[in-house]
Image (cartoon, rainbow, N blue to C red):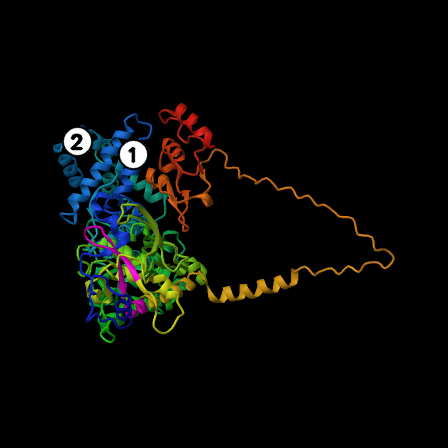
Amino acid sequence: MQVSNQEKIAFFLTGRRSGTDLKAIDGSYRPALFARYADLTSLRYDLPLVLNFDERPDRAVLSLSGLIDDAVGSLAADADRDRFARHGYAIEQEIRKLLSEKISADFAELWNAAVVRLAQNGAGDVAASANILWKCFDASGTIIDADEDLSSRVLFHAWKSVQENKTSTFRQKAKRLLLKLHGILEAEFAASAEGRAPERLRAAIGSTFSSAFDFDEMSRILDGSKPSFALSDQRRNRIKRLIEVLETQRFFPVTKHSAEPYSFSFFRCSDALEAYRERHAEAVELLKTLAIAELESKGEYRESVHDILFDGFGANGLNADELGELPDYFVCTDADSLDAAETEQLIDLLAAGLPIKVVVRTDDILKPSFVAEGHAALGIRSRQLVNTAIALTDVFVLQTCASHLFKMRESLLRGLSFDGPALFSVFSGSNGHNHDVPPYLVAAAAMESRAFPAFVYDPSAGSDWARRLSIGENPQPFDDWPVHDLLYEDESLQARSEKLAFTFADFIAMDDRYADHFAIGGALSQNEGSVSVTDALDSTGSGIPEEVPTVALVNDQGVLIRVVIDDRLLGETRRCRSMWHSLQELGGIHNSHAERLLAAELKRLESEIAPKPEVVIPSPESSAPLPAVTVTVEAAEPVREDHGDEPYIETPRCTTCNECTNVNPRMFAYNSEKQAYIADPDAGTFRQLVEAAEGCQVSIIHPGKPRNPKEPGLDDLIARAAPFN
């Protein structure tokens, strides 16, 4: 039945559908741009992740896709490279299927299980390829997929890797100091009468050469030829105390006989704060011991000067450099468990500048407001924490979604290594209200829709906002909403294409709690009487509208349908955009103050340089016309930039056809304008460069010269590349 435009307008204005043929949407609908992501196990993306146990922090978290791509790339000179790649991608897909049955497993075990399953299905000599690829990985550990615990597991593992580096550095320093301190005491003993006794000398030489020496005569000679060396009782006791503190401290165990080390990971801020307070005196003692031991090891400790200085050590607290030598405290919590008292203690920890790293996981950013119906909280607790932390000015703050943890790993490690407090706010995508949409997709959609944008605030990057705050990890950060191409077939099976913005309204359409804010019925798959959400947001009209805003959804049969949204949801989308605009300004994009000043300056410059018309007064003596002057302007030849032998793309001419990114998405990538460039020429082969150039619709890819002289078939590839260089 055809639904009238008046019924749709009434629903938009009131949110009611009584007496009409309009219906609310159900769980079978999802955003149209999700149509291509129906089965994640068949796609290649960052996840699953390998929590690598055997490497430095920058290799603590690895992507399975990245490992396979790197391994295949390292085998580029091998004649069987294509077979290795084919089998590697098949194993990768099989691992995704296995992980869909369980969230994590040992990487080696799951790799072998995938190989066995493929071999049982007749995948030829996949085992041989798997062994060769595995040797290229240089990785072992746990492989995990997306769930509500992904962020905590990734960050905890990365934190442990950073702490192991810090532990190694401390142990090297402590062992060096212990060796010198013990050496001072041993030197005193060796110079004493007891140390020169025949029995001591015999024990020092050992039994092998004991018959070759007269130890009684040696003892007499040493006593007579070398004066004894004795420490003052005060210095001797001080050195013994330094040794005792270093060997018994529980922050970084130095020897196998050390006491059980302290734990520094917690689930509650109150527990971390209590532990910090209980250990504070020991921490001060350890840091003072390190400073005194350095002076003693160099023979520079002067009791008349340093005793007074170190008596008050730590009385005014410890600075960031001093605290940076000790382990960082790690707290992993979730937004729902942060009651008022816990939130207050978290803020106290951050404000005190303590060496604490806090992960706050948010599962539900669309929790309905208790005050206003249809009003989404938009992660209010996490937003309040993040805003408060940034206002403290000296706290490292990172906000992201679980889907982008791997892409932002460098920022994660920078925050975990920061000498001071750090807050990590992560949206997991697991709220139980998105039907069968995987948490990874929900998290990615939250960032796309600006509902949970990513940013990094790094106090160590500089003294101003331009250096400290970055929002560049968001998709198309200069725009209100990311825009993508939607390809589909219409009712006549004709191919169609249109550009769709992914807005907050598209994101909230997945949540069953807001289904009543959408209406479907009749021939709503048509565009009559409807406008896009972005056009509706920009509309300045008042009164009863002639068109209603719609979002493009697909049902479980893949049918594209235009669904009406009500005015309340349009207002929520406008509010989300407004918050994004505020973040853009802080990140230096579309800054209203700068744009106003720039416009005023441009207007002033235009008025100054505008040519003034020249008034020509003809001579009364002559009325003859002036001779015509012909001016010939030759068009300058465009200057082509010299790229030498390097491959490059004429990016401004890119038509976004996806041909090159389909060849190798690590070598070719899109910029913020959705135009291709060569992201990493070493991420693939010269063959891929040539094939991409041949497949480019506008011939803008220039392969350059081969980077690997050992790559097979270069003569043929160079000849094929010639027309494009």
Which residue is denoted by mark 1 in the rendering? Answer: 72
Q: Where is residue 59 in the image (x, y as percent from the top left)?
A: 29, 45
Q: In this view, does 47 lie to the left or right of 689?
A: left
Which residue is denoted by mark 2 in the rendering? Answer: 123
The residue lying at 16 percent from left, 41 percent from top is: 110
SS state under label 1: helix
Label 2 vs 1, first from the N-terminus: 1
Q: Who is closer to the viewer here, 661 or 420?
A: 661
Q: Point out the stretch of residues depicted in magenta.
A: 550-572
Residue type at numbered disc 1: Val
Q: Position of residue 506 (x, y in %)?
A: 28, 59
- The quarter of the picture where the N terminus appears is bottom left
Residue furthest out toward the left: 120
Distance, label 2 to label 1, CA atoms, is: 18 Å
Q: Who is closer to the viewer here, 294 or 355?
A: 355
Q: Position of residue 289 (x, y in %)?
A: 32, 58
